[in-house]
């Protein structure tokens, strides 16, 4: 027995979407339609003959009316649905920052893009104790990389930006040392033998030793004061002993 009933058109779609987002539409028409004609006002694409159009993108804010006409061999029915496209919040652009481990506390709100609202939420990705509220305290951090996320949300839309924070160790030239040596003694390494405090090995001597390295040769290098200088890194100044 064939009931000979025309379709009853029905659209399944969200009431509100974020501008720039893409959604899938669903036909929920009853009575077995066999063809579909969509007019997707405000969407891209703007028309479709698929039963369930996929990846329909809304690139401009506003209120738009979606139209669906369905048919089968017994008749045609049409329906509409309004969809509201709202603005995305703007959390600003990602930022990469390098600080020395000796720096004072820094308020990350001051490093947000101009005009970004300050009512967002902060996420401490690494769980470091150096970050509380919106403040990062390099002196409480160990050298390394940290990630802090700032998120802004409205009714349904969310935007986030990422701070990548590089905490750098202070250059270490070690501690002052004193050497008493005879001019016929064997050469020795001043970094390894004289300086204390486990100095970094990328420093240089002033005045330059005749060896061009850290090797002091008492037969040719004169007495005097030699400064061992470790150069600055991206965030911290030089150190010397």
Image: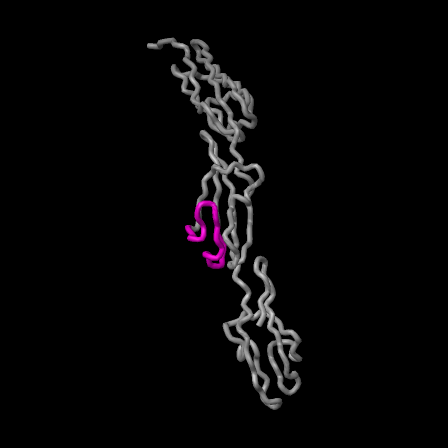
Q: Nearer the viewer, residue 56 or 30?
A: 56
For the point 48% across and 28% down, the residue is: 23
Is residue 33 left or right of 39 when viewed as pictured?
left
Q: Which residues are magenta?
A: 127-146
The C terminus, quarter of image: bottom right
Question: Closer to the camera, 156 or 129?
Answer: 129
- Percent x, y of residue 178: 55, 80
Q: Indicate the position of residue 15 as horizontal and vertical percent values.
A: 45, 23
Image position, residue 49 (x, y; %): 51, 20
Q: Residue furthest bottom?
A: 184
For residue 136: magenta?
Answer: yes
Q: In this orientation, which residue lies closer to the viewer: 184 or 5?
A: 184
Quarter of the figure with residue 210:
bottom right
Does 153 appear above or below 127? above
- Left or right placement of residue 228 versus residue 23 in this view: right
Q: Position of residue 86 (x, y in %)?
A: 51, 26
Q: Quadrant of the N terminus?
A: top left
Frontmost residue, 173 versus 42: 173
Would you say residue 46 sits in the magenta stretch? no
Q: Residue furthest front?
A: 104
């Amino acid at each position: 027995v064939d009931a000979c009933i025309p379709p009853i058109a029905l659209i399944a779609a969200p009431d509100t979407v974020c501008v720039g987002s893409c959604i899938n539409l669903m036909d929920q028409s009853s009575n077995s339609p066999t063809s579909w004609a969509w007019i997707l006002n405000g969407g891209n694409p703007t028309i479709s003959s698929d039963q369930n159009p996929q990846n329909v993108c809304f690139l401009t804010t506003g209120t738009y009316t979606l139209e669906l006409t369905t048919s089968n061999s017994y008749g045609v029915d049409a329906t509409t649905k309004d969809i509201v496209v709202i603005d995305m919040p703007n959390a600003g652009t990602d930022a990469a920052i390098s600080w020395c481990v000796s720096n004072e506390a820094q308020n990350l709100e001051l490093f947000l893009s101009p005009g970004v609202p300050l009512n967002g939420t902060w996420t401490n990705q690494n769980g470091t104790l150096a970050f509380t509220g919106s403040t990062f305290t390099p002196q409480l951090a160990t050298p390394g990389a940290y990630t802090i996320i700032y998120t802004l949300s409205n009714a349904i839309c969310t935007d986030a930006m990422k701070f990548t924070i590089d905490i750098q160790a202070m250059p270490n030239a070690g501690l002052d040392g004193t050497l008493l040596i005879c001019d016929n003694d064997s050469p020795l390494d001043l970094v390894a033998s004289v300086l204390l405090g486990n100095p970094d090995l990328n420093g240089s001597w002033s005045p330059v030793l005749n060896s061009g390295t850290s090797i002091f040769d008492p037969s040719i290098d004169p007495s005097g004061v030699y400064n061992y200088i470790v150069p600055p890194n991206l965030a911290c100044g030089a150190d010397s002993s």
